Image: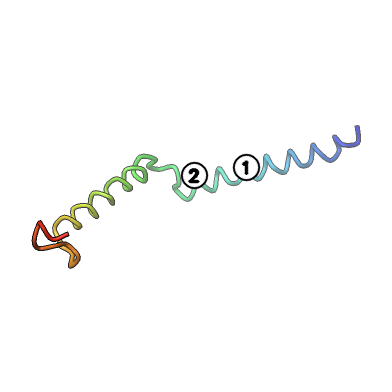
Amino acid sequence: MTVIYVLIPIAVLLTIIGIYLFFWAVKSEQFDDLEKEGMSILYDEDKQASNDTTKPTENTPKDPHEL
């Protein structure tokens, strides 16, 4: 029974910390655009892939039979 005297303050403290972190995330605009960050990963890969195809590297063989 005395364990409850320890567990209840811990639960209240964790709840207060969770609420604080939630309001901090909302205030710092973490939840404004949830899709943008996920899509930015795809756009970055497309930019790198297009840059790789336009710039030939020095290691590519000039003769197709040369490997």
Q: Residue at x 54, y 48 (%)?
A: 24
Q: What is the C-alpha distance between the residues marked 1 and 2?
A: 12 Å
Q: Please name the amino acid that badge 2 sits on.
A: Val
**Horizontal and vertical percent position of residue 23:** 55, 44
64 sits left or right of 44 in the view: left
Q: Which residue is tagged 1? A: 18
21 sits left or right of 53 in the view: right
What kind of colouring is applied to the model shown?
Answer: rainbow
Instruction: Name the quarter where the N terminus is drawn.
Output: top right
Q: Nearer the viewer, residue 16 or 55?
A: 55
Crowd around label 2: few <14 · some 14–19 · many ≥20 (10 Å): few
Quadrant of the rendered image containing residue 5:
top right
**Horizontal and vertical percent position of residue 11:** 74, 38
58 sits left or right of 30 in the view: left
Mark 2, secondary structure of its residue: helix
Crowd around label 1: few <14 · some 14–19 · many ≥20 (10 Å): few
Q: Which residue is tagged 2? A: 26
Q: Residue furthest top?
A: 1
2 is higher (above) or lower (below) than 49: above
Instruction: Name the quarter where the C terminus is drawn.
Output: bottom left
Q: What label sits on residue 6 in the rendered view?
A: none
**Horizontal and vertical percent position of residue 32:** 40, 43
Please name which of the two marks, 1 or 2, marks the residue nearer to the observer: 1
